[in-house]
Amino acid sequence: MTRHPLHRRSRRAGTHPELRYFILLALAGGRVQGMARRMAAQAGEGAIAVEYPHITLAGPFTLGRGRVPGHIAGVMRTFARSLPLLQVPVHGTVVLHGRGRYYYAFRAEPPSGFVEWYNALRQALLPFVRFLSRHDLVPGDRRFHVSLLSGVPRGGPAACWEGPGDPCSADIDLTAWRLVLAAARSVRGAWDFCRDEWISRKALFSREEDAESLRALRRHIRSAAAAALRDRVGPGDPEVLVTADLHLGHANIIRYCDRPFSSLSEMDEAIIASCNEVAGSGAGLIVLGDFAYGPGRRDATHYLSLFQAPVCLVTGNHDRDGGGDTFLVREVDGVRFLLVHDPADAPEGFDGYVVHGHHHNNDLGQYPFFHPGRRRFNVSIEVTGYRPVPLHFLAAIARSEAGTVRTIEYLARDHHGTNH
């Protein structure tokens, strides 16, 4: 079989091997690292958990004669500006084989338009490279996945890890926040989608730079949520808003649910400020459970004093202060809602829509923001853009012919044709 000229890797005897480069789509948050570490601990000796979750877009490749990494960075800058900040759905794991070992990864579902963008990027790289991986030479050959674990020996775990956070049944969204140029196990620089700028290698390992990128990501998420609300609900009288699973005082929830915050104090302040901004002049705010939790939390009365609107608490499984309702029933614009923390606790036979929390953003296949077939809304705060939503807004969606909506950001993307 004749090999493509860009797939040759021959070199003269006695010369040093050329640097091999990769272009990676880096994913924000710590949830994948946590899953990978648990998998590695169970897989045994030799298994290595991924430290920086990513999707490989191109590589390995070597540079052509007279070409330098700056040429590749220039191509990346050009194409990064045309790619919106992505939410990448992943569905369960795939097992890869190679060199007597297993490799585990999440299956990534490319968002609309992404494959066309990738193919254009691949073509733009060709004039600058000498060797290119076969996956990048043949259109359609590249399979997108999120690496989790490498080096699992044959005879090790062959399928799933059962229990809470089982990666084999995961159905979550991961945020692609940087386009990274890497070589020889090091990072050369990256385009930051949140800040719309190139970041140097040194800055990529700075906590201050990460915190700034997270703030920019948070602004994007809240802007998308606000756009979804504006498109479907016009100005009107103040009304009741609803949210769930604030987890005030709970530092670990940042990692568990990939919340875009760099510290507990930043998270608590931002969530309370967002609720006050939206509900400050409203008729009230209903929180569907898990208001505050964790060893670092303050008493519920302390947090309640920081909210400008009246707050009604529905009891969740992590609430320890008591005093909340088990569920509430409200009717808005002719649509009946049952407001409860865990949808499994909804009374049988309710003929309206169940509005719930509890599941956060950890199973968006079964518990998306809106599931028309099961007549459910998931208003966990991660799913609604870190802001409460009006019951009037939920009624408008319930009366529409909308299909399943994974998170509120998808409403803005579907309406405007982009999520940037």
Image: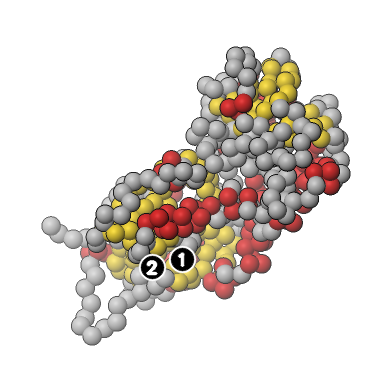
Check disc 2 and give the amino acid type.
Tyr
Q: How many marks?
A: 2
In the picture, the disc for residue 226 is: none
On the rendered structure, is 28 left or right of 10?
right
* Residue at image location 55% in from the left, 27% down from the top: 371
Which of the 4 image quadrants contains residue 213?
bottom right
Secondary structure of residue under mark 2: strand
On the image, which quarter does residue 193 sit in? bottom right
Q: Which mark is residue 21?
A: 2
Return the residue nearer the eye: 191 or 35. 35
Residue at image location 53% in from the left, 52% down from the top: 31
Q: Position of residue 105 (x, y in %)?
A: 39, 51
- Is residue 300 in view from this perspective? yes
Position of 61 compared to 186: left or right? left
Between the C-alphas of marks 2 and 1, the distance is 7 Å
**Which amino acid is tagged 1?**
Leu
| 395 up-or-down from 220: above or below | above
Image vertical order of residue 366 relative to residue 196, above or below: above
At horizontal 33% and vertical 51% (from top left) the residue drawn is 157
Q: Position of residue 294 (x, y in %)?
A: 69, 50
Residue 45 locus on image (x, y percent) = 35, 64
